[in-house]
Structure formats: structure tokens, C-alpha cells
């Protein structure tokens, strides 16, 4: 019998704090404390924005004094199923490993639908209290389509998905342009295109600094509200393990990283798959207005950049006003629309009157889950500076919600998905099948080594050579080029979750882009080839993962970060972050690879301080999957996981986030206990230096938490104080680190010296005792 299994864990022993610690009490002026507060306490408007991260999984941390939970009984040596050898599938996950991030990736890469409406429709929607018009009204309902959507893959097999969605975007596609070569920007910035090439922050993502700021604001809000809770005693110790649950702030980081995908030439995920053209029934000539808006998108100021295919689906919507409109006339106009434009039409019936929360059928407009980081920052700043603290989110009638959901489902199930399936079948037969054949491979070789490939459409004088379709000066392929069509085929297959067809197409494209020296296109194809292989539910051998997937990830990250090739660190971060999460789902054998790519993010400096702490946590979570085999846990990485959890705690402490630091330190203590067991109830940490470092860090984190609590507890003090920091009478702290209700008052910086106070105070007490004895 293993004695570690029968041992009853007792609370760990820490440094001797039995005697009271006497510290100087410092008080800052009320003005300085109020200016340092990032948020107002009772603001329901802000709470709605931060509700996704305001409640952490598990109970609150406990200053590192949580009793570590012993690990479950170790499996027998060489037990069947103990190792998956990297062949595990997302449908056969290990216990404690969540499929959350695979679902997040599926929901991130979805079809984009542009929205354009006439003046009457926009006026009516704004009259309902929705300042963003029709786009703001439709966006939340497109993120998850009601019901299941059935999709047919390239071999004719059908599969239903309950989490399928689309992304409604503005009709000004130029507002989502990302960084391009200077020549490409100059070619777009002509006077006739100024109206839609202006950058709009709500339409574009891809800015890592903005993602860091958004997550930091959520962290500030959570820490502020947690420290100003009514109870000053820490809650029950939590047993959060990195492999069981992930931080909601890390989930938010990934979601904002994937929100608002930029409109770029090397991938077509942000290119519109369809467009919704809406006209109000109050318009005197709706049919003519539909044609005018269509021409505006085709040739007018709403036309897309030259690398975007303008031949996408148009969906015509007649907006009927329930209170003042004539339904008979609207039905007559709708019949005319179907005769002119076909079956891609819909009659949307909405109420025009503004709804207030006290109405019987009023429902709050849902919040967009996939807003870009710039948009969320603007919303936070707007609500912070507003005088009104009430929630400004508009309310709409329940009948409008039912009508919009019906419209969205009909748009997706009857128009967008069938149209994408037809395009995939056509391009697969006409373009990809020829490229796979012997003649296609011969043409690829001839294009690389001989001038035989000049028969392809390459008459543009701006091309770098006569045997390539790549415009090296502008940095893109034209939409009718075979490479551009194949890239769209691969992206459509990825969005329709046909991973096998997507992988084979991306793999062919890598060779073509490499031959053309289109480095950003090459990096994009390598990135999506790796993600397609990892998203597939089929098993992966270690050889396939090493020879193919690791090679693709390495090539994509290098090409994205190399200044002579792409210089696109955002896409390198996206590649590594998504790859490590998908590798982590493959089981213990892939855990080392996942941790290696997470460490690569830190080594390359792709993230800021907040991202550095979050991805350090992910390194620990990756190593924690490998728990070892047998009674001796051979092959485990729990000690490495604990080490990186300690590093994450130190990173959070340096950022002033005491609760996150305490959580990571508790996780580290639990991992050390699972790896080394317990010695008389105390966690066995292998090295004395590590024990000293953890104890010192725990003291510093405790001092930081006490400092923050002390500053906030004195906000309502009525005593008169000076503008500068004044040292007052001493304050005696409670001897128990878990039971004190008051703490060090002053700046955060003195808390870092708390660990070194105890030895000096002990020596002082010994001298006082000797003096009393001689007296």
C-alpha cells in the first residue's frame, strides 16, 4: 500500500507568524486614492460589459494557504489507455480537458455578411433607440443561428451543427483594411475611394496592443470588485487545476484575438460571402432602390478593394413597419421582388416605436460576443465618461426578436450555406481537380523551372514575371487567378468544417505560394494547413505531427515574423496560440509540443505583459496534462507545470494582480503536492531555494493584497489628512494571515519588503527579552 494514499493532508506550514507584526500605518490623501480608482463601484452599465469575466470559475484564492488536495490514486504501470501517443481525437478527450477552444475556433472563422440599407430603414431603426442602425440590430443574432444547420461536405456526407453562425459587418469593406505594402495602400487611396477606405476601429481587429488593453481592463474591474467585497476574510480555498479549467481572461484574450478579422489579400475569411440589401416599405419605389444599392456595391463608393471578389450573393430584404405600414402593399411589393431577384428575398416585419424596459414584451438587445477589441475599448470609455450610469443598451419588442431570428435562419440555411456548397463543388471540379492531376503538377514544375507557364492569365504589366499570377508590387493575386480561387475554396471548406478538403487544398497552395515567393500567402496557407489537420476528428500519429504539422507551424511563424517576408506578428501569435490549444487536446504525447509553442510565444515577444502572464499559465496547463504512468508517475511533467505556475504568479504580482497571483500560486502548490506528496502535511518541494522563493513570493502577494485592501478601506475616512503621505501611529496586525481584516495602508511598493520584516522583528524581540531578563 502506498503510504502517500493513506496520508491525511494537513494545512501546510509556513514561516513563523505567531507573534504580532508591528508595521507603520501610512495614509494617502483622499484625492490621490480616488484618482487611482479605475471604475465606479455601482455602475450597471459597466457591469454588463465585464460580466463575461466578472465571475471566475471556482472560489476565490486564499493567499497561498489552501490545503493542497492529494492526487487521485495513480494508475497501474503500463495500464491500457494511459498513453494516447498523440492519436487522441477531440471526441475522446482526457478527463479534465475541455473542448472549449476548439469550439471557439469553429465559431471564429465563419462567413461574413455585409449589410447595407436605405435611408428610410436606417431612420426607422435609429428611431427605436438603436444608434448603429440595422447593422447593430442584426449583429448579435448572427453569432449563433437558431436551430441546427445541416452542411454537406465534398463527398456528399451531411452533418448538422448547432453552433453555426455568421458575422454581420458594415458595407464599407474598406474600413476593415489591415496593414498593406505601401504600393498597395497608394493604389487604393485615390480620391474616388476615400469614402470607404477610411479606417473604422469597430470594423477591424488584429491589434495585439488593443487586445492586451481590453483584457487588462477586465482584470482591473475584477480585482477592484473582488477587493471591495463586503467580506474581508478570504473565501474557501479553491481547487482549480490548470488542466480542469482555464482562466476566463485567457478565453477573452483568444476571443478578442479572433474578433474583427482584418480584410487582407492573403486570406478570404473576412471577405464577404453575401450581402444583405434592405429597403423600407415606405420607400416610394423599393425595386429601383434595390437596384441603386446593388450598383453602389458593384461600381460605386461601396465597392470592395481589387483583391476581393465582387461576385458574391445578394440577399434582398423588404423591411415592413408594423404600426404604420400597409401589409397588403408590402406583400405585393415582396412578390415583385421575388420575380425580379429570385428566391433570395425576405419580408422582415418590425415595429417602429421605441421600446422601454417597463413594457410587457420588451427584451434587452443581446450584447455582441465577437466585437473587436477597438470597439469594446471605445464602448468602455464611452460608458465611463457618461454621466448616466444606467445601462444604455436598447430594448426591443419580443416580436422583433422572433422575426429577426427567423430571418437569420432563413438567410443561412436556405441561401448562404447552399451557395457556399455549390461554389465548393464547382471550384473543386474545375480548378482543384485539374491542379491535382499530372498535368497540373507538370505546369507547376514548368512554372518554377522553365518559362512554359506563361500561358496562364498574367497579362498585367505590374506582375513581377510573365509566368506567375502574383503581383509582387501590389502584394496580392487577382480574384480570378487560380491561386485566389483555390484559397477561397480552402477557406470556404474550413468555414463549412470540411477539414479534409481544406487541408488538401492548403497543402497544394503552400507549394504554389512558395514558388511565387508570396511569403504572406505562403505563411497563411501553412497556418491553416496545420489548423485544418488539428481540427480534424481523425487520429494523428506522432510521425505525422512531427513531420507535417510542426513543420507547417514553424514555417508559418517564421514567415509571419521575418521582416523581409511579412512582418505580421499578429498572425504569428494567432498561429501559435491556436496550434497549442489544438495540440493540447491530442493528449499527453502532444503536451510537450503544445508547451513548446506556448513558450515560443514568450520567447518571440509577441505579447505584452498581460499576455505574458496568461501564456505562462498555459505552459503550466500544457505540462500538467502529462501526469505520468504507474506508481512513480514516470514521464510526468508536474514539476515543470508547477514551476511555470510559480512564474505566472510572479508575473501577475509584478502587474499588481494579487488575486490572479494567488490563484497561480495555489495551483503550483497543488501540483507540487501531486508530484512530491506530503511530509507531515506540508507540501514537499524538492529544492530549498524553491521553497524559499515560494514563501517569499507568497508573503509579497499577501502584502500586495493587504495594501490594496487598506487603500480601499480608507476611502470613506472623514479625518483630515495632508496632501502628501503621512506616517501615523502604528497598527498591530492580527497574527493569523487568514483572519486579518485590516492591512498595510499606503502605496503598493512597500509590500515587497514584507518578507524581510519577520527576521528583523524576531531579533528585536530577542534583544528586548534579554534586556528585560537582566533588569
Image: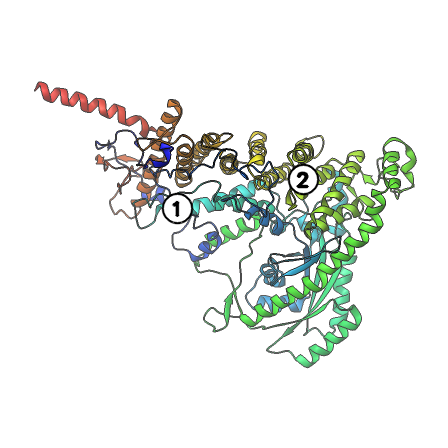
Q: Is residue 655 left or right of residue 536?
A: left
Percent x, y of residue 507: 75, 40
Percent x, y of residue 206: 62, 43
Tell me the quadrant of the picture where the N terminus can be found.
top left
- Residue 594 visible, this angle: no
Percent x, y of residue 691: 37, 26
Nearer to us in this view, 735 or 585 = 585
Q: Is the residue 486 above or below the residue 82 in the image?
A: below
Q: Is the residue 493 above or below the residue 313 in the image?
A: above
What element does badge 1 sit on? helix
Q: Nearer the viewer, mark 1 or mark 2?
A: 2
Classify mark 1: residues with Cα within 10 Å, few (<14), some (14-19) or many (20+).
many
- Residue 535 visible, this angle: yes
Query: Residue at coordinates 44% horizontally, 48% vertically from top-left?
Result: 57
Q: Earlier in the sequence, mark 1 or mark 2?
A: 1
Percent x, y of residue 524: 70, 40
Residue 224's disc is 1
Residue placed farthest to the left in the image? 775
Would you identify the image quadrant in which residue 577 lies? top right
Q: CA distance from mark 1 to mark 2?
A: 40 Å
Q: Which residue is mark 2?
A: 530
What element does badge 2 sit on? helix
Amino acid at each position: 500500500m502506498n503510504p502517500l494514499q493513506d496520508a491525511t493532508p494537513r494545512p501546510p506550514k509556513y514561516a513563523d507568524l505567531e507573534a504580532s507584526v508591528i508595521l507603520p500605518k501610512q495614509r494617502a490623501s483622499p484625492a490621490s486614492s480616488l484618482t487611482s480608482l479605475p471604475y465606479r463601484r455601482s455602475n450597471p452599465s459597466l457591469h454588463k460589459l465585464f460580466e463575461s469575466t466578472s465571475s471566475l470559475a471556482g472560489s476565490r484564492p486564499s493567499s497561498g494557504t489552501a490545503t493542497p488536495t492529494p492526487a487521485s490514486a495513480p494508475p497501474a504501470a503500463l495500464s491500457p489507455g494511459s498513453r494516447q501517443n498523440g492519436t487522441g481525437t477531440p471526441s475522446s478527450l482526457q478527463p479534465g480537458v475541455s473542448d472549449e477552444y476548439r469550439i471557439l475556433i469553429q465559431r471564429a472563422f465563419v462567413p461574413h455578411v455585409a449589410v447595407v440599407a436605405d435611408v428610410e430603414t436606417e431612420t426607422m431603426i435609429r428611431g427605436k433607440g438603436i444608434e448603429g442602425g440595422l447593422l447593430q440590430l442584426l449583429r448579435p443574432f448572427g453569432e449563433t443561428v437558431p436551430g441546427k444547420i445541416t452542411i454537406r461536405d465534398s463527398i456528399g456526407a451531411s452533418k448538422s451543427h448547432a453552433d453555426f453562425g455568421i458575422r454581420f459587418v458594415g458595407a464599407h469593406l474598406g474600413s476593415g483594411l489591415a496593414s498593406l505594402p505601401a504600393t498597395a495602400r497608394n493604389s487604393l487611396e485615390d480620391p474616388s475611394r476615400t469614402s470607404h477606405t477610411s479606417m473604422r476601429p469597430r470594423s477591424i481587429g488584429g491589434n495585439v496592443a488593443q487586445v492586451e488593453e481590453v483584457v487588462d481592463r477586465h482584470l482591473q474591474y475584477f480585482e477592484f470588485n473582488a477587493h471591495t467585497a463586503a467580506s474581508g476574510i478570504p473565501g474557501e480555498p479553491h481547487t482549480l487545476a490548470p488542466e480542469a479549467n482555464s482562466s476566463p481572461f485567457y478565453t477573452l484574450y483568444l476571443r478578442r484575438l479572433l474578433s474583427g478579422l482584418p480584410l487582407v489579400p492573403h486570406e478570404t475569411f473576412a471577405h464577404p460571402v453575401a450581402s444583405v440589401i434592405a429597403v423600407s416599405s415606405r420607400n416610394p419605389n423599393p425595386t429601383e432602390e434595390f437596384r441603386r444599392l446593388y450598383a453602389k456595391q458593384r461600381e460605386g463608393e461601396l465597392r470592395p478593394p481589387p483583391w476581393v471578389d465582387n461576385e458574391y450573393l445578394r440577399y434582398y430584404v423588404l423591411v415592413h413597419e408594423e404600426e404604420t405600414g400597409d401589409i397588403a402593399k408590402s406583400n405585393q411589393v415582396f412578390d415583385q421582388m421575388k420575380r425580379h431577384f429570385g428566391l433570395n428575398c425576405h419580408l422582415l416585419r418590425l415595429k417602429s416605436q421605441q421600446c422601454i424596459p417597463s413594457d410587457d414584451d420588451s427584451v434587452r438587445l443581446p450584447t455582441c460576443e465577437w466585437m473587436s477589441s477597438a470597439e469594446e475599448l471605445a464602448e468602455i470609455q464611452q460608458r465611463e465618461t457618461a454621466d448616466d450610469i444606467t445601462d444604455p443598451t436598447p430594448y426591443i419588442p419580443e416580436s422583433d426578436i422572433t422575426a429577426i431570428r427567423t430571418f437569420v435562419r432563413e438567410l443561412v440555411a436556405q441561401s448562404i450555406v447552399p451557395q457556399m456548397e455549390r461554389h465548393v463543388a464547382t471550384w473543386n471540379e474545375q480548378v482543384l481537380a485539374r491542379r491535382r492531376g499530372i498535368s497540373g503538377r507538370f505546369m507547376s514544375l514548368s512554372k518554377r523551372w522553365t518559362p512554359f507557364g506563361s500561358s496562364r492569365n498574367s497579362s498585367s504589366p505590374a506582375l513581377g514575371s510573365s509566368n506567375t499570377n502574383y503581383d509582387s508590387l501590389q502584394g496580392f493575386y487577382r480574384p480570378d487567378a487560380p491561386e485566389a480561387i483555390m484559397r477561397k475554396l480552402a477557406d470556404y471548406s474550413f468555414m463549412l468544417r470540411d477539414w479534409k478538403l481544406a487541408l488538401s487544398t492548403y497543402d497544394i497552395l503552400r507549394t504554389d505560394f512558395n514558388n511565387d515567393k508570396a511569403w504572406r500567402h505562403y505563411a497563411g496557407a501553412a497556418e491553416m494547413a496545420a489548423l485544418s489537420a488539428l481540427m480534424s476528428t481523425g487520429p494523428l500519429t506522432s510521425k505525422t505531427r512531427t513531420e507535417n504539422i510542426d513543420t507547417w507551424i514553424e514555417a508559418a511563424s517564421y514567415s509571419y515574423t521575418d521582416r523581409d517576408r511579412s512582418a505580421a506578428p499578429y498572425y504569428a501569435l494567432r498561429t501559435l496560440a491556436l496550434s497549442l490549444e489544438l495540440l493540447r487536446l491530442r493528449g499527453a504525447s502532444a503536451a510537450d509540443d503544445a508547451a513548446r509553442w506556448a513558450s515560443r510565444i514568450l520567447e518571440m515577444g509577441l505579447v505584452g505583459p498581460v499576455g505574458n502572464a496568461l501564456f505562462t499559465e498555459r505552459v503550466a496547463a500544457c505540462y500538467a496534462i502529462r501526469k505520468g504512468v504507474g506508481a512513480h508517475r514516470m514521464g510526468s511533467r508536474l514539476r515543470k507545470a508547477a514551476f511555470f505556475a510559480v512564474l505566472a504568479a510572479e508575473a501577475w504580482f509584478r502587474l499588481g494582480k494579487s488575486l490572479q497571483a494567488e490563484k497561480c500560486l495555489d495551483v503550483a502548490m497543488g501540483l507540487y503536492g501531486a508530484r512530491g506528496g506530503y511530509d507531515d502535511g506540508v507540501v514537499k518541494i524538492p529544492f530549498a531555494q524553491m521553497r524559499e522563493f515560494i514563501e517569499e513570493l507568497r508573503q509579497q502577494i499577501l502584502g500586495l493584497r493587504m495594501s490594496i485592501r487598506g487603500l480601499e478601506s480608507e476611502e470613506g475616512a472623514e479625518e483630515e489628512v495632508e496632501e502628501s503621505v503621512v506616517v501615523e501611529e502604528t497598527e498591530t496586525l492580527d497574527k493569523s494571515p487568514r483572519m486579518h481584516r485590516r492591512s498595510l495602508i499606503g502605496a503598493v511598493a512597500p509590500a515587497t519588503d514584507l518578507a524581510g520584516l519577520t527576521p528583523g522583528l524576531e531579533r528585536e524581540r530577542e534583544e528586548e527579552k534579554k534586556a528585560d531578563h537582566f533588569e
